[in-house]
Image (cartoon, grey):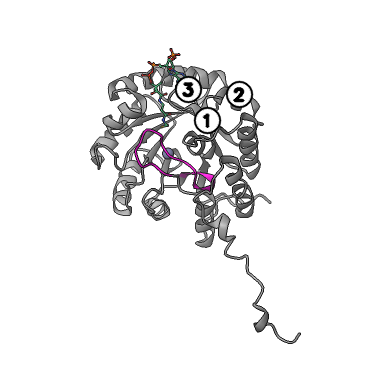
Amino acid sequence: MSAAPPHIVIQEVAPRDGLQIEPKWVKTPDKIKLIDSLSAIGFARIEVSSFVSPAAVPSLRDAAEVFAGVTRRPGTVYTALIPNRRGAELALAARADELNFVMSASETHNRANMNMTHARSLAALAEIAELAHEAGALLNATIATAFGCPFEGAQPFSKVLDIVERYLAVGVDGITLADTTGMANPNQLTHLVSAALRLVPADELTLHFHNTRGLGLVNALAAYDAGARRFDAALGGLGGCPFAPGATGNICTEDFVNLCHEIGLATGLKLQSLIDLSRRLPELVGHEVPGQVAKAGRACDLYPLPERLRGPG
Ligand code: COA
Ligand code: ZN
């Protein structure tokens, strides 16, 4: 008998969002090993790397080698982040199953991150959609800074929804609303997620949160209550955009899985396997990572009674 389908789909982004900001070079075989271990845990989607300027994000300059080295698990979609047509070509040559195009709601952040205006990003997206679909690959399109920009502040809902419509007009297969620097709050989410779900089916809409202001899991739960069902998260809570001042990690995969399981939402992921893998991250990146549950253990992992409370036997 197969397990019941998960209530929530958690997509792993540590190899891309997590490692893009790490100052220590993580060797290509170690990246491949991390991704293979994530595949074995059974994620439906893993963001493997990004095909961007190696001068902009040196830590992911081995994207092609990483794609070539990972063992593809049937049932997992292996995604590559791309900013432009060149990125799409390289990602398709590397046999990415899905391209994840990124443009920011805030034009200021789009210039800081991609050196591109909205008009230039959108023109590239139209070409990328053709390339992706000719090659039989999926195309997801992300709206970064959808809930606030570190340079411009809050972004109007109408602007974000207008970009959703532009993305849909070129035939994307999925859309991600990304809170790049943890500026979202639950009230905002209730409104924006409900409005987005009038345009995009729940299984094609992803929410991407950073825990920069400690609201990551609260926001994820608010988005779930508003109907969202797909979420990005990073093992250990790694992550952050190198071109957004003050950026910090994504919501932590194992902390989110713990939350889901404790309140009765199935994820299809085994918490202990995530914890075991997360505990290997400090050695990989050379520092402690933000995740909590890997430090504390599962809520069901109880300790022996203190000696003085144990009976005589
Ligand atoms: N992959 C690899 N190299 C790329 C590339 C891509 N997708 N796009 C451009 N390049 C190379 C060009 O070939 C050129 O190389 P050269 O200097 O050896 O000739 C160089 O990068 C600059 O190209 P140009 O088209 O002038 O781009 P730019 O300097 O205006 O930068 C981006 C634009 C989009 C390439 C760059 O800003 C970028 O990679 N941003 C990504 C940021 C990111 O990943 N942020 C975090 C994730 S949201
Ligand atoms: Zn991110």
Residue drawn at the location 37% of the way across and 33% of the way down: 243
Residue 54 is labelled as 3
Residue 74 can be seen in this image: no
Residue 62 is labelled as none
With 37 as the anchor, is 252 left or right in this view? left
The residue wearing badge 1 is 49
Quadrant of the rendered image holding ligand 2? top left
Q: Main secondary structure of the magenta part?
A: loop
With 254 as the anchor, is 32 left or right in this view? right
Query: Do residues under tags 3 and 1 come within 8 Å of each other at their CB atoms?
Result: no
For the C terminus, the quadrant is bottom right
Q: Amino acid at mark 1?
A: Ser
User: Which segment did they paint magenta?
Assistant: 231-248
Q: Position of residue 170 (x, y in %)?
A: 37, 24
Q: Amino acid at mark 3?
A: Pro
- Tag 2 secondary structure: helix
Q: Is mark 3 within 8 Å of ligand 1?
A: yes
Magenta stretch contains residue 239: yes
**Residue 59 sits above or below residue 254 on the image:** above
Residue 170 can be seen in this image: yes
Residue 65 is labelled as 2
- Tag 1 secondary structure: strand
Looking at the image, which is closer to me, 101 or 44? 101
With 102 as the anchor, is 165 left or right in this view? left
Looking at the image, which is closer to me, 304 or 269? 304
How crowded pointer 2 is (Cα within 10 Å; few <14, some 14-19, many 20+) is rated as some
Residue drawn at the location 56% of the way across and 40% of the way down: 285
Q: Position of residue 51 (x, y in %)?
A: 49, 24
**Residue 86 sits above or below residue 97 on the image:** above
